[in-house]
Image: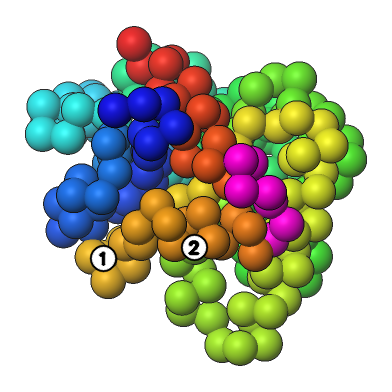
């Protein structure tokens, strides 16, 4: 299979979502979602991630927190998994980029603005922090929220393109009903302003470079 036809799904969050995504994508990352305000039991977490790696191969941790200091605590640990941070809180968005996590997912989530500016974009580009463009929040939104979110995503994409920030498009599916095909995810990219080669690269070139960190 040529590189042009090789697609990666970077963020699915349940076994059933993984099973379906695995039929459509060449590589799939299973994401362990953690909603935390305090440090976890690190030994238990490492054991759980070890089991997930045995089952799924490539694994990420999605940290959902309002405490920026927790991001640094996770980054300091050798968890042998990609580290994603759920965006939304501006302090969290900034710390995720400063700490050089692997990806900041949806920095606009739950905001009245897009949560990402020229300063953060420049920093993300220099530090190699990817921006994840997630489809699943759009599936749960009402028409007004969906239109607003698409506008925010388009604004963030303009900055990602300008500052050459790594990125990927993902379903971020928490159930099999939220999983979408590579074609559908490319359509999302095109809808927010990507050219077809840019959308393809967001499911191929950039994800594969990020996965290289796990090797």
Res 72 quadrant in image: top right
Query: Foreground: 43 or 97?
Result: 97
Q: Is residue 208 left or right of residue 53?
A: right
Element carrying mark 2: loop
Q: CA distance from mark 2 to mark 1?
A: 13 Å
Q: Position of residue 25 (x, y in %)?
A: 29, 44
Element carrying mark 1: loop
Label 2 crowding class (10 Å Cα cut-off): few <14, some 14-19, many 20+? many
Res 49 quadrant in image: top left
Q: Position of residue 125 (x, y in %)?
A: 74, 26
Closer to viewer: mark 2 or mark 1: 2
Q: Which residues are magenta?
A: 192-198
Query: Foreground: 138 or 65?
Result: 138
Residue beneath the point at 53% across and 42% down: 200
Res 55 quadrant in image: top left
Q: Which residue matches tag 1?
A: 175
Instruction: Judge whether residue 103 is colored magenta.
Output: no
Q: Is residue 99 left or right of residue 49?
A: right
Q: Is residue 166 left or right of residue 49?
A: right
| Residue 85 visible in rendering | no
Q: Is residue 174 above or below residue 95?
A: below
Q: Which residue matches tag 2?
A: 135
Residue beneath the point at 34% across and 11% down: 215
């Amino acid at each position: 299979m040529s590189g042009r036809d090789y697609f990666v799904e970077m963020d699915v969050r349940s076994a059933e979502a993984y099973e379906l995504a695995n039929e459509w994508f060449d590589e799939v990352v299973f994401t362990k979602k953690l909603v935390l305000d305090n440090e976890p039991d690190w030994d238990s977490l490492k054991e759980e991630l070890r089991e997930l790696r045995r089952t799924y191969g490539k694994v990420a941790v999605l940290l959902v927190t309002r405490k920026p200091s927790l991001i640094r605590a996770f980054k300091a640990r050798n968890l042998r998994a990609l580290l994603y941070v759920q965006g939304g809180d501006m302090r969290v968005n900034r710390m995720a980029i400063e700490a050089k996590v692997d990806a900041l997912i949806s920095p606009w989530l739950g905001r009245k603005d897009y949560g990402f500016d020229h300063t953060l974009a420049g920093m993300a580009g220099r530090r190699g922090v990817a921006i994840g463009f997630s489809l699943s929040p759009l599936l749960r939104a009402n028409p007004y929220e969906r239109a607003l979110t698409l506008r925010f995503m388009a604004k963030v994409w303009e900055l990602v393109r300008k500052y050459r920030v790594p990125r990927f498009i993902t379903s971020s599916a928490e159930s099999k009903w939220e999983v979408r095909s590579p074609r559908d995810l490319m359509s999302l990219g095109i809808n927010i302003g990507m050219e077809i080669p840019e959308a393809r690269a967001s499911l191929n070139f950039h994800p594969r470079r990020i996965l290289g960190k796990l090797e």
